[in-house]
Amino acid sequence: MLQVVINSVVYASEIAIIAIGVSLCYSILRFTNFAHIQLAIVGGYLAYTFASIPGLPLPVAVLLSAIATGLIAVLVDVIVFSRIRNISPEGKMIVSWGVALFIRSMVAAIYGGSAKVFDVPTEVVVMQGAVFTTLDVTVVAVTLVLMVALHAFLYRTRVGSALRALASNYDLAVTRGIPGDRLIRLMWFLSGALAAVGGSLIAMQTRLQPSLDLIILLPVFAAVTIGGISNVFGAVIGAIVLSFAQNLLVWIDFGMIFTGKPWHIPTQFRDYIAVLALLIVLLMKSSRSTGGKK
Amino acid sequence: MIDFAIYLVTVAAIWSVLAISLNLQFGMTGLVNFGQILPFGIGAYAAGIGASLGYPWWVGAIAAIVFAPLCSLAVVFPTRRLSQDYWALITLAAAEIFRLTMLNTPSVAGGADGVMVPRFGSSTTALVVSLALLAVSFLVAERISRSPFGRMLRVLREDEVLASTLGRNPMRYQASVSMVAWIMGAAAGIAYGHFSGYVAPTSFTVTETFIIWTAVILGGPGRNIGVICGAIIIQVLGVSSRFVAQWVDLPSDLVANLRLALFGLLLVVMFIYRPQGLVPERREVRNAARD
């Protein structure tokens, strides 16, 4: 059981840190940014590049990658999204896929399709029958620190309050003298940087390849939807709920309960649980909202 | 050379059917389907699985044509009364789940190795079948587009609340148009399966969906002729990039990636500078009293 908790917390951390950027973007610009996943992949590759070519220590490489990816996110906004502020949310969503397709193909063209593996020094820790690695601890710690920092930034600083003002009523906030455009850039930088950290962490845990985006796509968007897309920290809750649901359902021995023979849900079916959770949430939302658009 | 021309026209015809199908959903009704590859995959896999079980081709075809619209209903139902963000998510998830199922259950359709499908007797047969399919889809889509039903779909696209105040149930319109569109997609998939002779999960990724989207946005959402032009341009670009690869002696996967990057770029540029597409939708003026 302890093992389930540990696995869930580690997986939730990886997903939450990426999902939070999607919520951040939605809360201010009101569209679902599908290109966000690609920013995570870019972040992973940049961290790999910084760590392998100049041979920087891994934390420095991840930090540099976060800054660079944040700037890339700002650049994407300047080139693409700032020109289409006034079109429908559907249109923005479609454009974000165009951006995603472009970034994904460029990453694949530059780095090639073969998998890259981070050289992470890690040790296995056994505690009361549960197994985890020091890397797992780092992943959770980094995520926790970043979440607390983000929360403090949004709720304890003037700039953070300004961002929240933009999220709650953009026009009113701008009329009251909040520099909307500059803060949108800041939001892009933050979400890009967080995505880069998340992408690097996931890449360290698994392997780095262009098709990694398909692996994190469903869990991230399921987490965002479960938590409520416009609520920034809802994404964290969504990630935790999703991760526990997945790990519990994979852990429970359904065979013993129903047929008497041991049988587990195979782990590659974890994404089904994500989609199932997504469906349940949508059905709940759908029956709650009566008429009109929600 | 003539073989190559036949190949190109066949591929372009199949992808045009997919583009028309997406156009019915997005261009006409405003449904953002990010899993357009799903009905296509259902068609192709039905052909493959039917053949591997030893049935004649029409069994797989009928199975696909029955199953695809049912899937579309399963996708429409949970997102009723929700905004397009959720429709996009659920279609995306459905298509990915289908791909993952095919990938992770080797007993059904060979897993990552895919499954063989009996090919069309000759490349001319494939050409004739694909063109016939395109003609039928085009006529159906045009018929819908010009009918009162099609006009109501456009009302729905522009303003769902307005459609409701006219006493129409948006959900029923969305459900019926998706069923028609998904049958088209499945039919294109069946033709593709028999044309390529081989079906594997890699042909049905999110990327393929966005190639169809690029065709629709490039051609002109809402206009059937436009999206056919879009699909043809995309396929010609796709096929010609292989020649470019041989010609300039670059590795083929690099060129394939650059081609996809170009598609992404086209999608974004079209949306920013010419959202109405190459062949824009015509504005329709109708006199309600005379109709």
Image: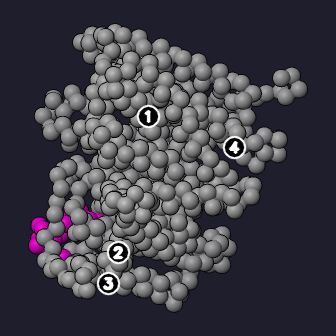
Q: Which element type, helix, strand or loop, lies under badge 3?
A: helix
According to the picture, the residue beneath numbered tag 4 turns out to be: B171
Q: Which residue is mark 3?
A: A141
Apparent side of residue A16 relative to residue B136 in the rendered image (left or right) = left
Query: In the image, is residue B116 above or below residue B271?
Result: above
Pointer 1 indicates a residue of which chain?
B
Q: What is the quadrant of the C terminus of chain A in the image?
A: bottom right
**Looking at the image, residue B1 lies above or below residue B16:** above
Callouts 4 and 2 in the same chain = no
Residue at mark 3 shares a chain with residue at mark 4: no
**Disc marking residue B42:** 1
x 47%, y 35%: residue: B39
Q: Which residue is mark 2?
A: A4
Q: Nearer the viewer, mark 1 or mark 4?
A: 1
* Mark 3 to mark 4 CA distance (whole Å): 46 Å
Per the image, is A57 magenta?
A: yes
Q: How is the image coloured?
A: one colour
Secondary structure under tag 1 reads helix
